[in-house]
Image: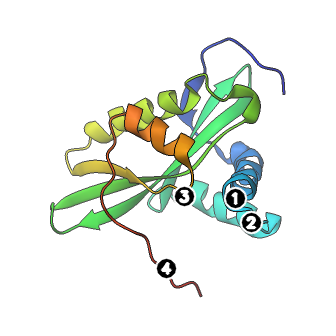
Amino acid sequence: MTVSPRQPTIREARPEDAHCIAEYNRSMARETENKELDAVTVLKGVQAGLAQPNLCRYFVAEVDGLVIGQAMITYEWSDWRNGELWWIQSVYVHPDHRRRGIFRELFQHIRLIAQNYPKVRGLRLYVEADNQIGKNVYRRLGMVHAGYHVYELEF
């Protein structure tokens, strides 16, 4: 991938972006958690999300017709707040385009959209405990540690 100095266009993902998003999801899992995700499962998951915006929405950063970064939002109902929290997930920026503000552009785009929905009460994300670079980026964007640890039970 060639590095371009142009500012990215941030847009909602389209079905034709599914293969790129799925590959970026697999790259992110490999880089951050040393996990190898099944390509078919991830592609089907991305396609299902793109087809059902009530489940999630993907946003991509694009330069010269190439997707160079992505983020997905999912929704959590908060009875404490009588509103939604939007979770930012599946964050990835192609290595050739890192440290150029691409995620900042994606984040600001999502933030502006969220602030225009009266029922959205905030944005959240989770980050791997050892991902200091990510933590620093999120702090610079005004996010604060929420004080929670994530537990899971997979089926």
Q: Earlier in the sequence, mark 4 or mark 1?
A: 1
**What is the number of the mark on residue 128?**
3
Q: Position of residue 41 (x, y in %)?
A: 74, 70
Q: Quadrant of residue 4?
A: top right
2 vs 3, front mark: 3
> What amino acid is labelled 4 in the image?
Glu
- Secondary-structure class at tag 2: loop
Contact between marks 3 and 1 (CB within 8 A): the answer is no
Q: Which mark is residue 152?
A: 4
Which comes sooner in the sequence, label 2 or label 1? Answer: 1
Disc 4 is placed on an element classified as: loop
Q: For mark 1, give the secondary structure.
A: helix
The kind of residue tagged 2 is: Lys
Label 2 neighbour load within 10 Å: few <14, some 14-19, many 20+: few
| Residue 29 badge | 1
Above or below residue 133? Residue 101 is above
Residue appearing at x 48%, y 36% in the figure: 137
Are the two marked residues, 2 and 1, in contact with CB atoms closer than 8 angstroms? yes
Question: What amino acid is labelled 1 in the image?
Answer: Ala
Q: Position of residue 145 (x, y in %)?
A: 33, 52
Query: What is the three-letter code of the residue carrying label 3?
Result: Glu
Give neighbour class at mark 4: few <14, some 14-19, many 20+ (Cα, 10 Å).
few
As drawn, the label of residue 35 is: 2
